[in-house]
Amino acid sequence: MPNGYMGKVLWVNLTDGTFKEEDVQEELYRQYLGGIGLAAKLIYENVPPKTDALSPESVFGFFPGLLTGTVAPLTGRFMVAGKSPLTKTWGDSNCGGYFGPEIKKCGYDAILIKGMANSPKYITILEDDKQILDASDLWGLDVVQTEDKLKEKHGSVQIASIGQAGENLSLISGIVNDKARVAGRSGFGAVMGSKKLKAIVLKGGKKITVSDKDALIQHTKDYNNGINTSTAAGILGYKTLGTTMGNEILFKIGDTPCKNWGGTKEDFPDDKLTKISGNEIDKYKEKPYGCFSCPVQCGAIMKVPEVDLEETHRPEYETCSSFGHLLLNDDLMSIFKANDICNRAGIDTISAGATIAFAIECYENNLISKDDTDGLELT
């Protein structure tokens, strides 16, 4: 029995509707470990040169790491990898939540998708039962609506899906699990959308063996205890404010861009900066949220009645930077709303904010006009 890995990957062919399990030799795990390493090996060997990322011949997949699904801390993450339609070369995107461990619990070190369905579909892997099902009633829904409908039908499952952005092949669209954990980079929402694949639904019960279970548990306890009892400002900040603890300090030290990368600290002074600080955002926190096997728990579920958001995830530092500093925007409510819109549609917030910043600079330099913006004054 292998330790830490499952020893096989699953291939799903959407063109002919088939599933194929492939054994992976131990030497490959020793050389590539899993996650992005195994992804690089399998994608390179199975995607011909010059393949269009949005074609049936394109392959992409979901790759949990070697320790994903075990008690080891900070190991709930997984990679989406393949050819990027945005860059037309290698692409990968890292994501947290609870979807990655479920891949391992289903018995696989990767789920790879190829081919193209002729109508909207979703994949279910429920224990050992694998199916490709009709998703016509899900097509057009956002990811929150999609997850709710699929959980109503299939019960306690883990889901990765695309929103309207992926369906419409937006090159800055991502794949979403846990309603707001987004594999946002490289445009894999478009790859999934091109294959007419709306969602993947997982529920597994397989155990992940490790070589020395007692030692792993003890190391994990020691690590988690160190995190939980730490008085370090950085750890305490992350546990309270998440990545938004950087909204002020990272800007002040010059790490955060502003005004489409062309501004300085004088363009976004302290009276603006404090309006989008982590402390201001934290006032709307309803409860903490954390990914699988993470002692930090840096996420949060928010309620923002000012913009009619009953339940939404806390915007990350990068989102606040893209829709805040980069646009010279200190309206916190607009950042909450933009974050929720993007998450639901499956749009990468970093790319979205950066695109808007570029458009504003083009508008201010008379490269585009109201004729190009449907009457919006982009300043």
Image (tube, grey):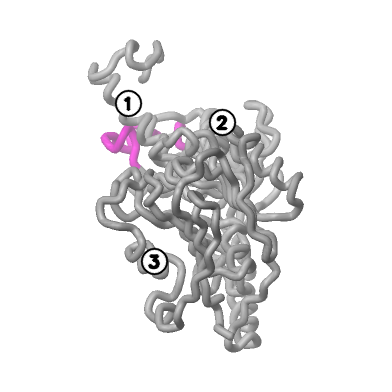
Q: Secondary structure at mark 2?
A: helix
Identify the residue position indicated by label 1 in the image: 359
Identify the residue position indicated by label 3 in the image: 42
The residue type indicated by label 2 comes to Lys
Q: Is residue 251 left or right of residue 341?
A: left
N-terminal of the two: label 1 or label 2?
Answer: 2
Towards the viewer: 147 or 373:
147
The residue type indicated by label 1 comes to Ala
Identify the residue position indicated by label 2 in the image: 337
Residues shaded magenta: 257-273
Residue that appears at 54% across and 38% down = 119
Q: Secondary structure at mark 1?
A: helix
Q: Are marks 1 and 2 in contact (CB under 8 Å)?
A: no
N-terminal of the two: label 1 or label 3?
Answer: 3
Towards the viewer: 145 or 266:
145
The residue type indicated by label 3 comes to Leu
Is 56 inside the magenta-drawn segment?
no
- Marks 3/2: CA distance? 39 Å
- Marks 1/3: CA distance? 38 Å
Residue that appears at 63% across and 37% down = 138
Q: Position of residue 318 (x, y in %)?
A: 44, 45
